[in-house]
Image (tube, rainbow, N blue to C red):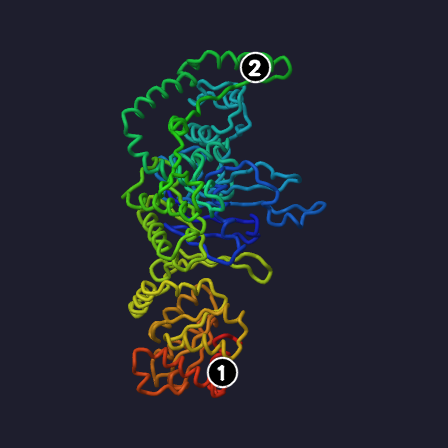
Amino acid sequence: MRIKSIAVKNFKCLGPEEINIVWDDIVVLVGENNVGKTSFLQAINIALYENNKTLPARYFRDIKNCSGESRAQPIEITIHFTDLTDLDREQRGVKNRLAASGEWILKKVFEYSEGEKSNAVKYFTYTKSREATGVTEESTWAAVRAAYADLVILEDKNVRAKVGDDIDDVLDEIAEKHSASISVSATEEWVANPGGFQSNIDSFLKTNTQYIFVHAIHDATDESEGNKSAFTQLFNLLVQAEIQGSAAMTSFKSSLREVIALYKKDADGNRGLRAISTIEDDLSEKLSRVISASADIDTDDLDEEKIAASVLPVPKISVDDGYPTMVEDQGNGLQRVLILALLQMLAERKSVSRGAVGPRNILLIEEPELYMHPQMERKMKDTLYSIARAGDFQVICTTHSPIFLDMAENHKSIVILKKDAARSVTRKQVEEEIFVGSTQAEQKERLRMILDFDPSVNEIFFSKQVVLVEGDSEVATFNRAGELLAVPREKMRDTTIINCRGKRTIPAFMRVLNHFDLPYRVLHDRDGEDSFNDTIAVLAEEKHLGSVMMVPETLEDVLGVDKDDQKKKDKPIHALQKVEELNSSGQLSAQLKEYVDFVFNN
């Protein structure tokens, strides 16, 4: 199965309005520092991998507002799973807990408690609740037998034990044999404690799932040591196909299976290890002297695959660049290159072995551009998209680099996090198509080609102020003229002037900006009765996000660049020369100030 979406609420800086992100193959989170990108990845980690029972009190968003009877709002992490297999649907906690849409919707809730930690996590699924007369999770098997003596599930059950995580199986059999005793809610709602013991859900989420979290590294040791390091997980993923198919592993698992069998009960309720039954009987006898209770030791949940994986060696890597050293003694840049190399090897595999049940393989990576020069950034971007496209991994990363965005072909992967005036985090993700219909196909293609040629235009997603212009002359002219006319440096640094490489592509950029609710300004030549003038004007008014200024003819005409020079290939140079000439003669302000003020919102 795969994750369709994840929503986080009241976690650190996120919330109270939940931040919901739709997750197909790859998601790229962008936004300023301290806006919640890392917090979102951390929430995913908590919900899917760490399976925390409690959370530190400092994780609650409004912890500082607590006083007296006031309490911080609960942290909620909600996950929609789709594409479930038949085996997925049969898992405890999932079976009979599906929404009408066929999705499995799980919510983990952490409630604030005074002290250093939260209350224990609560699990909910969104479905129709079921109840059977006289039976709950707290009922003993003796009570179930008294109410429904013909249930097969009663066999070999300790009559003094509680139903607990077997409740769904009990309800299934009661529904089959005593349907009149089952009541089902009329509508879907959040139903608590799916499958009884929450360990069922935790085990299911991690079963046979490769989960790799590459953190933003401050110490190379963080990612190179231990069995949870990104290096170890990638290494094991790359070798697992061969090791799992080896004769040695087959023999080891066979022996391990025999050992596990000693712990489990046979058909008669006996275990191969008499010591377990002896301990159980002795505990029950001693408990009965004090209270009316018995002890039941459950050893049936031993997982062969988990035990086998836990005994595999944890690799260490050294690098010989003339002097052999362990990776933790190398620089962070080299450590990131090693991670990239392993990811590239992973991408080259056509498919990744995974289990029959549980979530799709997951890769989280913080700031993949860290410690990399631009060429390596592009390789890392290609690698991440390749891994995601292969279909075996869902990938999510945070970034401050425009190189990792794909505005034209994969705009649905881009998620912008911002803080509004009230300092609440908001999210913008475009799920619909931006370029609809054949008339916009050419614009999309032109946009794609520009991005291939110059990925830096993706800076529109990072800039505080975006200005769209036609070409190089405008970019060069306004950057230099802004300096000469003493535009405040802060305004110039906050403004990104995008070279759209012609008026025909300006509408494509405007459509993207409109869909992502990003304000912008457009400065373009009139060029007579060019039909694109009308298109630009209409798009600017579509969401009232754009401001437009037209130059009477061309910018070169405004500057007074000679007509012969305007026809030459190096027009930007001639435009800059004219700017310097006008400045020297004291005429620059009169010629350009109106346009410069518009560009920099001065």
Residue at 44% over, 22% down: 300
Question: In x, y percent, where is residue 242?
Answer: 28, 32
Q: How many marks?
A: 2
Question: In x, y percent, where is residue 58?
Answer: 61, 45
Task: Using the rendered view, name the quadrant where residue 229 is placed.
Answer: top left
Q: Nearer the viewer, residue 383 or 326?
A: 326
Question: In x, y percent, where is residue 530?
Answer: 34, 82
| Label 1 environment density (alpha carbons within 10 Å; few <14, some 14–19, many ≥20) | few
Residue at 37% over, 21% down: 256
Identity, as a three-letter code, of the amino acid under mark 2: Leu
> Does residue 187 appear in this view?
no
> Does residue 540 appear in this view?
yes
Task: Using the rendered view, name the quadrant where residue 95 is placed.
Answer: top left
Where disc 2 sits, the SS reads helix
Is residue 429 placed above or below 98 in the rendered structure? below
Query: Which residue is tagged 2?
Result: 283
Query: Which residue is tagged 1?
Result: 594
Residue at 55% over, 52% down: 14
Is residue 585 placed above or below 437 in the rendered structure? below
